Amino acid sequence: MDGIKNSAGKPVLLKIVAAIQQNKDYLSEVDGLIGDGDHGMNMNKGFTMFADRIKDKDISFTGGLNELGDVLFSQIGGSMGPIYGTIFMNMAEAGSKLEKIDLNGFAAMLNAGLSALQEVVQAQVGDKTLIDTLAPANEAVQKAAKEGRDFADALKEMKAAAEKGRDSTRELAAKFGRSSRLGERSRGVLDAGSVSCCIILCTMADGILEQTGA
């Protein structure tokens, strides 16, 4: 599998929107255990606004990511809007000139998103945030790209790494956000941001695979 045309990426983005919409109650349920309980509502609001904006547009994958990032950054309250906005807009910028998004291009995009986020937040792997999902997913993609692996295999490995990272947050103590006030009592519950990040990455991978027939 050699990748997808950037211009043909809109269905992938809409698939991600649908996944967030379908999981909005679950995300709020997870968030409500140790947080404000509004993560699903906020994510659903932002992704639905984005879908409404692009429904009649002929938009590329990176163009859509930039639009999504802008909506989340400017329209969604709390910390998650700016966090996801930063990730998506920097992914978009890194891939904006690509006609075809192959493994090397996708690796550059994902790495740009993570790197930009790490410039504005202090959280690291082990702090019970979406970094626990995004960082290992990125690591898996970078390793696959360096080894010259097939894009389809890399996406499947990214999904596995994201899921493992998400699951790791269950036994971690939160160090950032409202849940950090609970300290050790935050153990035993998944981090909501890590869950939504996993949904996004896994759905993105599935969408790309579907577009290529892999």
Image (cartoon, grey):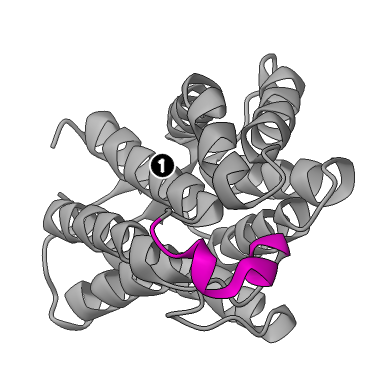
Q: Quadrant of residue 141?
A: bottom left
Name the magenta segment's main secondary structure: helix
| Amino acid type for the residue under numbered disc 1 | Ile
Residue designated by label 1: 199
Left or right of 157 in this view: 114: right
User: Residue visible at 25% across and 53% down?
Assistant: 159
Left-right relation of 199 to 180: left
Q: Residue 130, can we see it?
A: no
Residue 90 among magenta residues:
no
Q: Which residues are magenta?
A: 178-188
Image position of 176 with respect to 166: above or below: below
- Whether residue 148 is visible to the viewer of this picture, yes or no, is yes
Give the residue drawn at x 36%, y 58%.
166
x, y percent for residue 29: 54, 33
Residue 151 in the image, given as x and y percentages of width and height:
19, 57
Position above or below: 164 against 23: below
**Along the line of sight, which residue is nearer the eye, 95 or 74?**
74
Q: Residue at x 45, y 27 (%)?
A: 19
Number of marks in the image? 1
Drawn side of residue 138 relative to residue 181, left or right: left
Q: Quadrant of the C terminus?
A: top left
- Percent across and percent down for residue 77 are 85, 46
